[in-house]
Amino acid sequence: IALVLICTSQVASAASVRVGTWNLMRLGESEPKSYEAIAAVAGTVDLLAVQEVMNDQGLAKLEAAIEARTREPWSVISSSPAGSARYKERYAFLTRDSVVRYEDGAVSYLDRKRVFIREPFSARFRTAGGDTLVVGTVHILYGQSELDRVPEVRELGRYWSWLEEIYPGEQLVLVGDFNLPPNHP
């Protein structure tokens, strides 16, 4: 596996939920992957957003590996394929059932301007404490240079406003593979 980074943050709620995100680089297609090694890291969070899911088999293997590692049941939801005519991938959320569960509202962004190559995906989750939160995940185009990434990153403001309209009054979290360093303006 190439360099992989998982980010975690505490989400303020009655029951703390550890949220992580990971681009698993063609999950289910570019074998071999050490699902056990991935599960060792992924099992440290309660809600994991995954980018570059290529098929159901890879996602099922990941869920089984995380369940084996944590000895707890997990659930999975995934998006429809998103991308160009030549390349499509899906997003997925994996959740530790004892801490957080999918509630409703799984939806891909309606990108009327067609700025995103892969439309962001979001869903509402309910914590064991009864609070809800909405998580949106993105996979920003890498392209040939940093300039290719900027239009999608700029469009995140419009996406955030859309999330506020679709999920009024909800706590929102945006995660994903932004393909830019954290200090990028």
Image: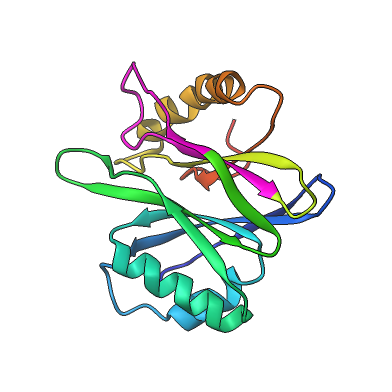
On screen, residue 25 above or below 185? below
On screen, residue 156 above or below 55? above
x then y, percent, for residue 78: 41, 51
State the residue at coordinates (71%, 24%). 169
- Residue 85, quarter of the rendered image: top left
Magenta includes 117? yes
State the residue at coordinates (28%, 76%). 31
x then y, percent, for residue 120: 43, 36
| Quarter in which the C terminus is drawn | top right
| Quarter in which the N terminus is drawn | bottom left
| Image side of residue 37 versus residue 126, left or right | left
Where are the magenta residues, as a range? 105-126
On screen, residue 62 above or below 14? below
State the residue at coordinates (58%, 82%). 69
Magenta includes 22? no
| Image side of residue 104 versus residue 53, left or right | right
On screen, residue 142 above or below 111? below
| Image side of residue 33 versus residue 156, left or right | left
